[in-house]
């Protein structure tokens, strides 16, 4: 039993109660039996009316069966294949049960109903194949068949075809049929293997690029015959390359063309096969594609040594890439400033010089805006540049600690922290956090000790192995401010603790924000250096004794840091710790090895470049690609996607310190870096707007993604598109406007629309929202029917499996009982009669 509106039955109780109330309130003089009979009849009438309105139906199993056979009339089958299709259809019809209703559908670029009385290949069928067989639209045939089934019948579709579809999507039609309870079965029939050559597709390495970038176009060629001819490439209607081709029967080949569009424009490419005698289907001898070429690539270049920037800037200028050099202190700090660049290069510049705001903006620039970031190595880059625990570290494809499998040198670190009254508040809390961060970058074989000072020295954490970070962090957290400033006793305690510990590397970091009492600090620092202990100093604020601290660092063989920003203390501590523990930088010659194929190395493999003289040690992250490694297997060139953008790490440098031989002896220096930067940079598109086009069946789906800023999307916007077209045989002609299409919002910041490309050729779509404009191209290829004499078994099998159907072998028929139909017997008419 089934109901159309069962909730209406809930009104029975209040309506019956209403009748009872009316009967009790009635003043009509009527005997009791008559009143009770009248009440019962009225109640029965109300119940019958509600039952009829609720739409009851009895569900019964129907024994009726219906089969629709879809007969492929495509030209790839030819006369011989079409005869096989009809013969198989006659055989199946003869084997079906006598009570099964049977329909026949002819299929080409459209579908039509065939008379069931005649299943012979006549003049009319051949003519329909000639006119409509230029395409195979399996989806349309299945959808047409679905509309033919009578009600109350089990529904089966038998597709008799070679499975080579040229339009639509059979899989989409199969999914719809499965939801409707229809089983699709398939019979594979191959046409004759006629002499045929074709270009199945022309694929560009990228659909959008900047002028001067190298473009690779790959033409896929298939042949069922042997012969000689030519393959030509046309660019905007002009022949730019021709190749002699010798093809063998059954051969499939990819031919690659390289082009370098030098002018901003929409480039239309066409690959054409010519001169092959005996080709049975010349209509499939060409393929199209479209490429959008934008202006020159523009990247922000932050270099720690501006005098060394000339090498990369001049080299990229020759490659058509503009690098805008920024020195430390002038790096953009906001996302809005970064959004105008196609990419960012950080080369040998410390994190504290970049700034916390700039690093956060760069993180969002990559993650949210799809920008590109390239970090190049040097003594102030990666871990030794203080990028540990920064927003930049999260997006890099490498980890910043030293390799775990290396034979480590044990290290001991002593931290001497000012805890005087002037350090109270943010400065002391940041110093404590920096001390914990310094402990984190050490290994389990290393040791750390923390001593604080005001007027006296206080041991916060004694020198101990870094086996329990939580215990060390707990001791550091207990540090509180005091009064006075005398760092001499604290330095003495730190020096003695380093003397006692067994470690090959011993280092001390002193932090203070004020003046100190005591004397002889430079002499003490020199003595420490003689004992193998290096000393670095950090001066916080303008009131610190900067001259003394710089002299101590110079005498102690360490680094002297000065900062007015307490937030940079953590960066300084991690940078100095990794630098002076001696495991992060390797300065000795090595040759790069290519271990993974990557587009960045196109034309450069096998990789034969001169030796590099050093690099910063890192570890690859799990999902990163590492095309180049050092001689010891450490990452040299690593790349991955992060969010919407891409990030590349090159752990050596691009200047004279480590890459001097590349600059003087390797002609591939410019090509290598141009390919790295082009592959990493943001693809040409609207600054905060992107347009994608994809074919879904016979329609093109337009999708626009509209951003307001790094973390928000634009809703309720007005997005309009203009569609341009140029025919396949007139690619040199200008694009003609054909339609304007407003897009509707389908999700947060997402806008969609559809149009149907009717003719073969190139369609260009330009989307606009306010001042933002972006464009993309779609190629609607010409006829691709091919007399390959083969069957696409994979497609047919997947379509039948989705619907629960079968691949039918010779002499096999589908089990029509496996898909029983249900029939609804409506019960409201007898209820209405009973009510009357």
Image: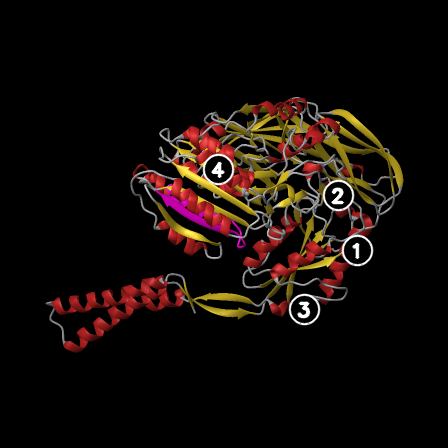
Q: Residue 678: which quarter of the image?
A: top right
Reading the chain from its start, which is encountered first: label 4 or label 1? 1
Instruction: Look at discs 1 and 2 and give the one toward the viewer.
Output: 2
User: Nearest the camera: 14 or 808?
Assistant: 808
Cα gap from disc 2 to disc 4, whole angstroms = 83 Å
Q: Which residue is drawn at 67% across and 68% down?
A: 98
Reading the chain from its start, which is encountered first: label 1 or label 2? 1
Labelled disc at residue 84:
1
Name the secondary structure under disc 2: loop
User: Nearest the camera: 807 or 332?
Assistant: 332
**Does any portion of residue 207 appear in the rendered image?**
no
Few, some or many residues within 10 Å of mark 1 (<14, 14–19, 20+): some
Reading the chain from its start, which is encountered first: label 3 or label 1? 1
Vertical arrangement, residue 620 with respect to residue 158, above or below: above
Residue 632 x/y as whole percent: 69, 46
Instruction: Look at discs 4 and 3 and give the one toward the viewer.
Output: 4
Q: Mark 4 points at which residue?
A: 525
Residue 194 x/y as whole percent: 84, 46
Cα gap from disc 1 to disc 2, whole angstroms = 18 Å
Q: Name the residue under label 3.
A: 97
Q: Mark 2 points at which residue?
A: 785
Q: In this view, does 694 lie to the left or right of 215?
A: left
Question: Magenta segment, which residues?
Answer: 430-453
Cα gap from disc 4 to disc 1, whole angstroms = 96 Å
């Amino acid at each position: 039993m089934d109901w159309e509106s069962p909730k209406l039955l809930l009104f029975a109780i209040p309506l019956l109660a209403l009748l009872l109330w009316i009967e009790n309130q009635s003043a009509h003089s009527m005997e009791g039996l008559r009143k009770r009979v009248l009440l019962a009849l009225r109640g029965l009438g109300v119940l019958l009316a509600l039952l009829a309105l609720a739409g009851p139906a009895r569900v019964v199993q129907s024994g009726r069966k219906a089969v629709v056979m879809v007969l492929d009339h495509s030209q790839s089958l030819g006369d011989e294949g079409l005869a096989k299709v009809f013969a198989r259809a006659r055989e199946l019809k003869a084997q079906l049960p006598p009570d099964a209703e049977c329909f026949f559908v002819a299929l080409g670029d459209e579908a039509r109903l065939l008379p069931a009385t005649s299943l012979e290949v006549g003049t009319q069928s051949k003519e329909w194949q000639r006119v409509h067989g230029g395409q195979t639209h399996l989806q349309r045939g299945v959808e047409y068949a679905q509309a033919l089934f009578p009600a109350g019948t089990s529904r089966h579709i038998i597709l008799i075809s070679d499975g080579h579809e040229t339009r639509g999507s059979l899989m989409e039609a199969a999914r719809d049929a499965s939801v409707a309870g229809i089983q699709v079965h398939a019979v594979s029939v191959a046409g004759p293997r006629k002499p045929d050559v074709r270009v199945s597709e022309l694929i560009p390495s990228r659909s959008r690029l900047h002028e001067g970038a190298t473009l690779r176009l790959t033409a896929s060629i298939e042949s069922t015959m042997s012969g000689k001819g030519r393959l030509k490439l046309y660019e905007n209607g002009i022949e730019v390359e021709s190749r002699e081709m010798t093809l063998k029967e059954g051969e499939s080949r990819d031919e690659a063309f390289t082009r370098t569009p030098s002018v901003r424009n929409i480039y239309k490419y066409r690959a054409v096969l010519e001169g092959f005698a005996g080709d049975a289907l010349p209509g499939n001898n060409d393929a199209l594609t479209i490429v959008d070429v934008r202006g020159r690539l523009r990247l922000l270049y932050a270099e720690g040594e501006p005098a060394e920037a000339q090498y990369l800037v001049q080299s990229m200028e020759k490659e058509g890439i503009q690098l805008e050099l920024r020195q430390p202190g002038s790096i953009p700090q906001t996302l809005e400033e970064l959004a105008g660049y196609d990419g960012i290069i950080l080369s040998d510049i410390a994190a504290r010089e970049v700034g916390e705001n700039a690093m956060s903006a760069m993180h969002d620039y990559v993650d949210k805006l799809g920008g590109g970031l390239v970090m190049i190595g040097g003594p102030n880059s990666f871990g030794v540049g203080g990028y540990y625990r920064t927003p930049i570290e999260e997006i890099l494809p490498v980890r910043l600690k030293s390799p775990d499998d290396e034979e480590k040198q044990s290290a001991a670190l002593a931290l001497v922290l000012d805890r005087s009254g002037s350090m109270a508040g943010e400065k002391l809390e940041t110093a404590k956090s920096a001390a914990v961060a310094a402990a984190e970058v050490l290994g389990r074989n290393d040791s750390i000790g923390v001593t604080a000072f005001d007027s006296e020295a206080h041991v916060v954490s004694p020198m101990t192995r870094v086996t329990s970070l939580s215990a060390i962090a707990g001791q550091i957290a207990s540090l509180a401010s005091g009064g006075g400033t005398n760092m001499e006793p604290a330095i003495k305690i730190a020096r003695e603790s380093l003397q006692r510990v067994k470690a090959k590397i011993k280092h001390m970091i002193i932090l203070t924000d004020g003046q100190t009492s005591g004397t002889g600090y430079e002499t003490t620092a020199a003595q420490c250096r003689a004992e193998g202990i290096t000393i670095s100093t950090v001066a916080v604020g303008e009131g610190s004794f900067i001259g003394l601290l710089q002299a101590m660092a110079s005498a102690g063989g360490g680094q002297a840091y000065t900062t007015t920003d307490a937030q940079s203390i953590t960066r300084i501590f991690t940078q100095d710790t990794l630098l002076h523990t001696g495991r992060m930088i390797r300065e000795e010659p090595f040759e790069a090895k290519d271990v993974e194929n990557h587009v960045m190395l196109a034309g450069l493999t096998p990789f034969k470049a001169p030796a590099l003289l050093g690099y910063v040690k890192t570890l690859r992250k799990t999902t990163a690609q590492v095309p180049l490694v050092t001689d010891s297997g450490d990452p040299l060139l690593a790349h991955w996607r992060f969010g919407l953008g891409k990030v590349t790490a090159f752990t050596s440098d691009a200047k004279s310190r480590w890459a001097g031989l590349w600059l003087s002896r390797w002609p591939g220096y410019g090509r290598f870096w141009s390919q790295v930067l082009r592959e990493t940079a943001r693809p040409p598109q609207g600054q905060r707007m992107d347009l994608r086009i994809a074919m879904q069946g016979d329609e093109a789906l337009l999708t626009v993604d509209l951003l307001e800023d790094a973390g928000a999307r634009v809703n309720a916007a007005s997005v309009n598109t203009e569609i341009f077209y140029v025919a396949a045989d007139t690619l040199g002609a200008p694009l003609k406007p054909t339609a304007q299409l407003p897009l509707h919002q389908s999700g947060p910041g997402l806008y969609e629309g559809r149009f149907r490309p009717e003719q073969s050729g190139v369609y260009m779509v330009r989307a606009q929202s306010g001042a933002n404009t972006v464009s993309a191209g779609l190629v609607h290829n010409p006829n691709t029917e091919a007399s390959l004499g083969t069957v696409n078994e994979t497609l047919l099998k997947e379509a039948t499996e989705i619907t629960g159907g079968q691949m039918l072998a010779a002499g096999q028929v589908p089990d029509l009982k496996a898909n029983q139909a249900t029939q609804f017997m409506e019960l409201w008419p007898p209820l209405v009669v009973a009510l009357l």
